[in-house]
Image (cartoon, rainbow, N blue to C red):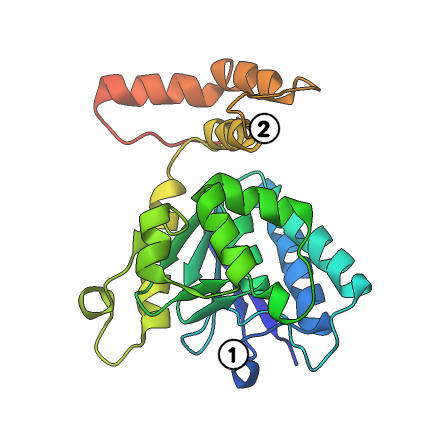
Amino acid sequence: MAFVSYSSDGAVARLTISRPERRNALNHEALEELHDGVRRAAAAAESGVRVLVITGDDDQFCAGADLKELEDLAFTRSLRAALDDLAALPFPTIAAIAGACMGLGTQIALSCDLRLATPDARFAVPVAKLGLMVDHWTIQRLAMLVGHSTARWMVLTARPVPAIDAHRVGLVHQLVDVEVEADAGSGPGQSVLDAANDLAAEIATLAPLALAGSKLGLDLLQPSGELVDPDGSYLAAFEAAWASNDLVEGRTAFGERRPPVFRGS
């Protein structure tokens, strides 16, 4: 049985976590399926995928690691590899969050570029309740996104943070009003997924080289605000964008007052 499914619709790929009986908590098998889906999305960039949306079934995002399968260092290493590959995807990633986004779920959300959530969503880093620690990347990423003060609160109290507070501190980019967004009979998970799909479709029309280079630049920012580019990858991406056919297309489309059609070259 597949716990994480991969699908695509044109330029938008989607990963859906589906273990509703465990509120989409991940065991070893589900984590490996998530990683396989991330690898598949990376490979699909060659065939035109430009955005990845990650969501969960049954109005839940991910309740964390499945503690029925004891979380050990092997699990942690596998998780770090999956999250590293997710964060390194060369196109924008969107987390569509409803309900529980706890522990490992928050780590997945942190690894995405953009986070949309319903008002019922809850975020937490409750490792101190289990005698565990998260890796340094998670601590650093959390602190950079929400600030040191909120990061300390989340890690040192292990308390959940409601979506409205997560939005206030920048952990959530957009709150999705379920009453407004949802179709009749659909739940909050569907409403936030619809909003994420709309955003993904909009982003997919933008210039891929510009997005990939800009994402790289944001990832290279240090806590001090300095952009460190040790191997010149950002400079190379910058020069490639300025020498691209997409730049020509963007200027031409602007002059002709039509939407541009970017090819990523």
Residue 173 is left or right of residue 211, and the answer is: left
Q: Secondary structure at mark 2?
A: loop
The correct choice, above or below, for 216 with respect to 31 in the image is above
At 66% across and 17% down in the image, what residue appears?
232
Question: The residue under label 2 is which amino acid type?
Answer: Leu
At 59% across and 16% down in the image, what residue appears?
235
Specify few, some or many for label 2: CA neighbours under 10 Å numbering under 14, 14-19, or 20 or more: some
Q: Which mark is residue 223?
A: none
At 41% across and 52% down in the image, what residue appears?
115
Visible residue check, residue 247: yes
Residue 140 is left or right of residue 94, and the answer is: right
Residue 184 is left or right of residue 121, and the answer is: left
- The quarter of the picture where residue 129 lies is bottom right
Number of numbered discs visible in the structure rendering: 2
Q: Which mark is residue 23?
A: 1
Quadrant of the frame with the N terminus: bottom right
The correct choice, above or below, for 114 with respect to 107 in the image is above
> In the rendered image, which residue does mark 2 sit on?
220
Q: Position of residue 3 (x, y in %)?
A: 61, 75
Pick the residue in front: 63 or 93.
Answer: 63
Question: The residue under label 1 is which amino acid type?
Answer: Arg
Mark before the other along the chain sequence, 2 or 1: 1
Residue 197 is left or right of residue 234, and the answer is: left
Pick the residue in front: 118 or 262.
Answer: 118
Pick the residue in front: 139 or 65.
Answer: 139
Pick the residue in front: 152 or 37.
Answer: 152
Q: Secondary structure at mark 1?
A: loop
Q: Position of residue 148 (x, y in %)?
A: 49, 42
